[in-house]
Image: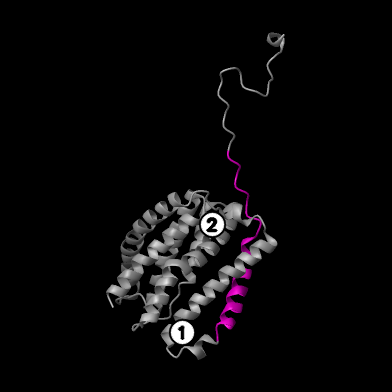
Amino acid sequence: MSDLVPPRPDLPAHGASIPEMPAPERPLATWRWWEAVLVYLLIMVVSAFAVLPIFQLIPSRGLANLTASAIIAILSVALLVLWLQRFHPGWRKVIGVPRRIWPEVRAGAGFGALLYPVVVFGVGIALNLLLEQVSGRTIRSPRQLPAHLSAAGVAVSIAYALVIAPIHEELFFRGILFRSLADRYGFAVGAGGSGLAFGLIHYVPGHAYGSLLLMGVMVFTGVALAWFYQRRGNIVASMVAHATFNVIGLTLILSLR
């Protein structure tokens, strides 16, 4: 009797392999880019007021600035996650959290190590020559760290470069801002918009052309990190790439002091 039962149309024929189900598509960002920018600016203002006592507690201005920057970044991450969890509960799937961490760590470290010489010694030199032609003077990027750092200052700088800044900046500029722009307007707008914003927050007071040089290099860095984030599809890889980029830069800065 079993031979007379017709095959079910929803099952594969005898001996045929069962096809793999396609991976579910990543959900689109539920937040608007302008909403993200407004929330981020508000968080930065609140965090800046919260760290004002730091300047009374730490007499060294350089160390106080570094410590305040680190605390502002930590508060910003906490408040951004709180905002996402409260108003956009599906944010983890939108931003991308990998199931396997180590392949993303390896890929991020490799990309960051390649990105630094390409951007700093390639794009940086080209942009420097262009600005020197326009201004008619020698252009130097402003200092990103105080000239004389204590041991505590070096420790805070390492923690900031290796952990705090990559998590803070990748969460917002790639995971939140780029994701929102790219999901609605395409990769070019997302990479360009988030890269421009990434460059602007790296403004360091100094000569106008020197500050412009630093921000220009950071714009290209932001665009490259957006491309890498889009390619890998998760925020961990871009955080590791950012950390590797920072470690190389910080090592050169500290060794040339």
Vertically, is 52 above or below 204? Answer: below
The local secondary structure at tag 1 comes to helix
- Main SS of the magenta part reads helix
Badge 2 density bin: few <14, some 14–19, many ≥20, Cα 10 Å? many
Counting residues from the start of the chain, the first of labels 1 and 2 encountered is: 1
Local SS, label 2 = helix
Q: Amino acid at mark 2?
A: Gly
- The boundaries of the magenta stretch are 23-52
Say which amino acid is labelled 1.
Ala
Given residues 214 and 51, the one toward you in this image is 51
Q: Residues within 10 Å of mark 1 (few under 14, many from 20)?
A: many
Q: Is residue 218 above or below residue 142?
A: above
**Front one among 31 and 185:** 31
Instruction: For residue 144, say whether it is visible.
Output: no
Looking at the image, the residue that sits furthest to the front is 1
At a point 42% along the width and 69% down the height, the residue shown is: 161
Mark yes or no: residue 201 visible. Answer: yes
Q: Residue at x 31, y 63 (%)?
A: 121
Q: Which residue is mark 1?
A: 64
The residue that appears at 67% across and 59% down in the rendered structure is 88
- Seen at 66% across and 56% down, the residue is 30
Give the residue furthest to the left. 256
- Where is residue 50 shown, x and y percent of the image? 59, 82
Instruction: Give the labeled residue for mark 2.
Output: 190
Give percent across and percent down for residue 35.
65, 65
